[in-house]
Image: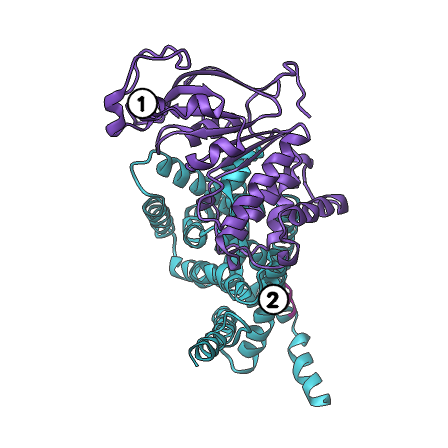
Amino acid sequence: MCHGSSAESAVVLAGVTVRYLGLTQPALADVTCTLACGQRTALIGPNGGGKSTLLKALVGLVPLTHGRITVLGAAAAPGNPAVAYVPQRSDVDWRFPITAAGVALMGRDVHLRWPRWPRRADRATAMAALDLVGMTAYGDRHIAALSGGQQQRVFLARALAQQAALLLLDEPFTGVDTATEALIFDLIDQHCATGGTVIVATHDLASVSAHFDQVLLVQQQIIAYGQPDQVLQPELLAEAYGGPLALFHRPATNLVPESPGRLR
Amino acid sequence: MGNTLDWLLDPLRYDFFVRALVVGMLLGVTCGAIGCFVVLRGMAFIGDALAHAILPGVVIAYLLGLSVVGGAVIAGVLTALLISAISRTEQVREDAAIGIVFTGAFSLGIVLISRKQGYMRDLSHFLFGNILGIAPGDLLVTAGIALVVLACLTLWYRELLVSSFDPSHARAIGLRLGPLHLGLTTLLALTVVSGIQAVGVVLVAALLVTPAATARLLTERLPVMIGLAAALGSGAAVIGLYASYYIAIASGGAVVLTSTLLFGLVLLLAPQRGVVARWRATRLYNR
């Protein structure tokens, strides 16, 4: 399912710096890394460490100050049907008159040419996606009439309806019940089992080892990237998150890329 | 039965009343439909501001002997651009920018019009409209604007839907929100221009906001909301015009007042969101 010129890499970041207007510290500073296809990658790091910015940069939603991002063989830009992005839920207008099925159907818009009127097949795909997240019975409900977990399922259904190769999920486990959490992990596994790639920004370090192939630890720069047991080391976490563990900070291991101008 | 029919048919003897009915219904549909996006995107203040800011365009076009509608549309679009330029400097909030621009533009219009003899009469038509004085040519303009606005809303329906509900997702799938918003504002300016002929600057916001807000209380689906708002808007126009014919009251005021009364009724009695329904629901819950 991974296609493009670089068949093995889903995402290539080359010297990526993102600086928001009016802030002295960049959100991301000279980030270089390559994420392989078909992998489940957890994106971890402290609040404000650049996780959301990194995901937004992959969708082409934030302008890069420096560097290049290649996603599935093409430069990162909005409107790529092969990239589905589930932002944190706070952005939507909850009073808007729309049902769960209506939200799922929005996953089809990126595939349709103007005027983007959905066809019967698009509605069927959206309903199938609702079914995958166990929300078929709630298709006619107003989006605000659902619980937090149900809402997250619906937004996941929208991403699934897009049938994208690369799934980007920003904090999908925040405010959801355990059943929904388990369902999200299942869907991630299925997506990768069929050749897709998933990148998930998460705070839940405890679940990372069991559910992800790779971990990317970000705090303005890439502190570490590798398999969970390699990255979930106290020193590395301390370096990223600060706090008392930072006292035991030791010189960079081979997992830590050279990083001049580190925030510390 | 025959009496009711006579009662309905009697005013139709007058061409001006028939034209007023047609214009009222066209406006009801157009304003109701675009009003849904105005209400959902929180643009009610912009609609009101555009109505006022159009005055200098109207006056200048009138003094130069050019198309008044053309002048109004240009003034409306310029106002929209100016508001967005000022709020983009990020030194002034958008609502303050709107307040500054529309009052400034309106004042410019008053100053220009005050140089003319008998300007109070023209100004009062502009402020309060004259739906019973619609000329056949004006009717064509209203119909043309209705056609353009409804066609654009249909063709950009998905874009407007997605960007109103979830701007982040809209940007992620490659929609350009700036041009979309400006396009909607331009359509709003067109709609406001045709509304001013009928009910005037002061009341045109009511045509945009009231039927759409009423419809929102009755449904959780945008297409249904648009249909209901159009029906409520044109229904209020018909009821208001008959009321103004039979009890000799100002037609623009009668149309808007009908709309307001319908809103009040629905707010009280709507099946789920109405005050009564919600009161009964909490009473059941507390028992």
Q: In which quarter of the image is residue A239?
A: top left
Query: Residue A239 bears which disc, if any?
Result: 1
Does B146 appear above or below B275? above
Spot occupied by residue B121 in the image (x, y as percentages of width and height): 42, 62
Identify the residue at image location x=55%, y=25%.
A77
Q: Which quadrant would the N terminus of chain A be assigned to in this image?
A: top right
Crowd class of label 1 (few under 14; some 14 to 19; many from 20; radius 10 Å):
many
- Main SS category, magenta section: helix
- Report the amino acid beneath label 2: Ser
**Callout in the foreground (1, 2):** 1
Query: Hue of chain B?
Result: cyan
Does A11 appear above or below A113? above
Does B67 appear above or below B85? below
Q: Which chain carries label 1?
A: A
Query: Residue A57 bears which disc, if any?
Result: none
Any part of residue A213 in sight: yes
Does B240 appear above or below B173? below
Spot occupied by residue B192 in the image (x, y as percentages of width and height): 51, 53
Q: Do the residues labelled 1 and 2 touch (CB within 8 Å)?
A: no
Magenta stretch, residue numbers: B18-22
Q: Mark 2 points at which residue?
A: B234
Query: Hue of chain A?
Result: purple
User: Secondary structure beneath disc 1?
Assistant: helix
Q: In this view, does A232 lie to the left or right of B166?
A: left
In three-dimensional space, the C-alpha distance between marks 1 and 2, rounded to whole angstroms, equals: 65 Å
